[in-house]
Image (spheres, rainbow, N blue to C red):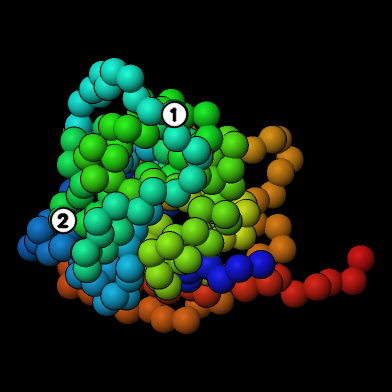
Amino acid sequence: MSERPHVICHMVTSIDGRLHPSRFTPPAEGVSAEALSDHYEDVASRFEADGWIVGRKTMTEMAKGSERSIADAPVVPREPHVAERGNRALAIAIDPHGRVHYGKDNIGGDHAVAVLGEQVSDAYLAELREDGVSYLFAGASGDDLACALEQLASLFGAKTLLLEGGGTINGAFFRHRLIDEFSTLIRPAVDGMAGADGIIDYRGEKGERPGAGQALRLTACETLEGGMVWLRHAVEDAPKTNA
């Protein structure tokens, strides 16, 4: 297997493992909400990662571009397109069906890279090229995440990437054993609602165990300002047991 980047799933969660801070209980008296929120980017910067990965829904909220009609778009082979990156970090969207519209070549200054399925239209690919967005293909259906990671290493030189997606994308990476480390910021808060999105929400068949064969090892624990706890866990092979 080709080299792939080291993937760190970097997330903020409530103490009940939920995903959306807008639903969390407020900070206690005297605790700064701004300080709690700032920890996420502050900790992320410590990894000096080459970029970050999110899913289609998250990237749509961030990109805010509009679909354009491109007449007579040329038919192009389903091969990677590397646009002008410069020295920028990578803003990577897992978008198999090509639904994110960028309108520019960056997200917050980081170079946009679309991970697509081969069924996307030539018009959509032309739109990405006009916007200066790079793209690559993760197999016919766009769900070969291992292949996508290998291309991110070979085409962009990515060595470390932060996985910052919703629970579905994070769950897919975990199920395919593509997460090497968890960086989890536990906010002193509770969501409390049954069924609310979690930081890992694998959408699989009943009875599946996405974590089968994997184990977590605590490597660091730090208490940050305001009572937020930062945990780091390495993901390793689970020990073999005798049946």
Q: Residue at x 40, y 32 (%)?
A: 98
- Left or right placement of residue 136 versus residue 4 in this view: left
Using the numbered discs, state the Cα–Cα distance from disc 2 to disc 1 in whole angstroms. Answer: 30 Å
- Left or right placement of residue 77 versus residue 45 in this view: right
- Left or right placement of residue 4 versus residue 104 in this view: right
User: In terms of image quadrants, where is residue 100?
Assistant: top left
- Left or right placement of residue 221 versus residue 243 in this view: left
Q: Which mark is residue 109?
A: 2
Please indicate, yes or no, whether residue 196 appears anywhere in the rendered image. Answer: no
Q: Residue at x 70, y 58 (%)?
A: 212
Tell which of 218 and 56 is nearer to you. Answer: 56
Q: Residue at x 30, y 59 (%)?
A: 90
Query: Where does residue 28 sit, x and y in percent of width and height?
Result: 16, 57
Quadrant where the C terminus lies?
bottom right
Please indicate, yes or no, whether residue 234 appears anywhere in the rendered image. Answer: yes
Mark 2 Cα within 10 Å, few/some/many (few <14, many 20+)?
few
Image: 47 above or below 70: below
Secondary structure type for disc 1: loop
Quadrant where the N terminus lies?
bottom right
Tell which of 11 and 139 is nearer to you. Answer: 139
Mark 1 Cα within 10 Å, few/some/many (few <14, many 20+)?
few
Give the residue type that dot 2 points to: Gly
